[in-house]
Image (cartoon, helix red, strand yellow):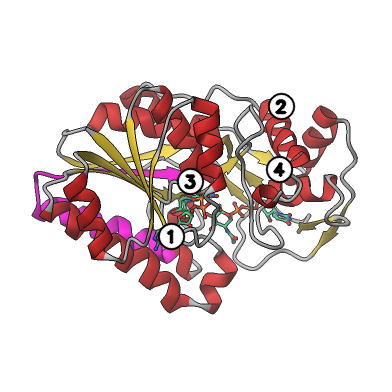
Amino acid sequence: MAILITGGAGYIGSHTVVELLNANKEIVVLDNLSNSSKISLERVEKITGKTVTFYEGDILDRTILQKIFSQHNIESVIHFAGLKAVGESVRKPLHYYQNNITGSITLVEEMLKANVNNLVFSSSATVYGDPEIIPITEDCKVGGTTNPYGTSKFMVERILEDTVNAYPQLSVVILRYFNPVGAHKSGLIGEDPNGIPNNLLPYISQVAVGKLPELSIFGNDYNTPDGTGVRDYIHVVDLAIGHLKALEKHQDDRGYHVYNLGTGIGYSVLDMVKAFEKVNNIKVPYKFVERRAGDIATCYSDPQKAFEKLGWKTEHNLEQMMQDTWNWQKNNPNGYQN
Ligand code: NAD
Ligand code: UD1
């Protein structure tokens, strides 16, 4: 029996493939490499000493999905494939809805035809919009998303919930990630953003390595302890293990299940800059600029449900997040293009 990982060459996908291979699972990856490199999977094989079956192709392509489902005995699908750049989604909404929503519908249609009934879906804390309470629990209101990327996640969640109601043989697990950071401790795989990074930690590490002159901190007048935005940063290896736990718990456990994957701890932008500087003994010049449109002041999870039901909790602290991010960045200043 094998697990199909869509988007498995990407940042979170590649780290999850490592953890699944280490747990002796057989893995098939489908990725169109639109935001990743095949080298990540070569590195995964180096880390684990195991092989990955790789298909270069698109989740919108039924032929390749049918081929995979007929040639491999797939029991579960972890669905990472998607576009994730918030700003780009505002400029190209149809592209984002087509890829993220139609892509997910196509995948689930082909799963149903092939009688593959277990799905884990990558969602995001972005579905909570500006959260009604902090820390955020899974039953907080969702919707109120402010960009097509976030709306695509919210809509796919709804589509999957309706689909589970109509096809009770399905088990669907929605994992709402908070802010994934860090890299595998080997320094062989990590986040490799295209162009100038949008997210905080890749930006900090590119300043540290000298590729960018300074960090712009978006706003210092939020209603937070130091005025900068507060988020729930989670080490990508902890996040990856969350997928393994979700599969173990809910394989063939029919129904629709939702979990927050976060640490439950909020750090500010300044906390992050200072921690990076201290742990890695390197200066990160920064300046304060205007708030970024669509940003909220504070967002962190209540991860209790995942702890109680999945037996999952994060093991990596802020120091390890900073160490592993820098280890990846300094050894791969140009990502996988070395
Ligand atoms: P990523 O871009 O590194 O990985 C996504 C992978 O999907 C890439 O390898 C890309 O080539 C592939 N892909 C995209 N569209 C595809 C398609 N139509 N067919 C086949 N492959 C396709 O991103 P990531 O950070 O690893 O994120 C993985 C998932 O988690 C995404 O769905 C993302 O929206 C979600 N997520 C990410 C974050 C984050 O901060 N990184 C936070 C919350 C949710
Ligand atoms: C962003 C996305 C969100 C997505 C998440 C994970 C927006 C509005 N939201 O969330 O939809 O799910 O990434 O991919 O883009 N910051 C700076 N300077 C920078 C970069 C970030 O000060 O150069 C600050 C931000 O204002 C924020 C914090 O750092 O307070 C974290 O930012 P980021 O890493 O982009 O994540 P989110 O804003 O949480």
Q: Report, in whole angstroms, how far the alpha carbon at label 4 lies from the one at label 1.
A: 35 Å
Earlier residue among tags 4 and 2: 4
Residue 188 falls left or right of residue 14: right
Q: Mark 2 — residue?
A: 319
Q: Mark 4 — residue?
A: 268
Ligand 1 within 8 Å of disc 1? The answer is yes
Earlier residue among tags 3 and 1: 1
Q: What element carries label 4?
A: strand
Q: What stretch is highlighted in magenta?
A: 151-177
Q: Mark 1 — residue?
A: 32
Q: Report, in whole angstroms, how far the alpha carbon at label 3 lies from the one at label 2.
A: 28 Å
Amino acid type at circle 3 is Ile
Where residue 55 appears, x then y in whole percent?
A: 37, 52
Amino acid type at circle 2 is Glu
Amino acid type at circle 4 is Ser
Q: What element carries label 3?
A: loop
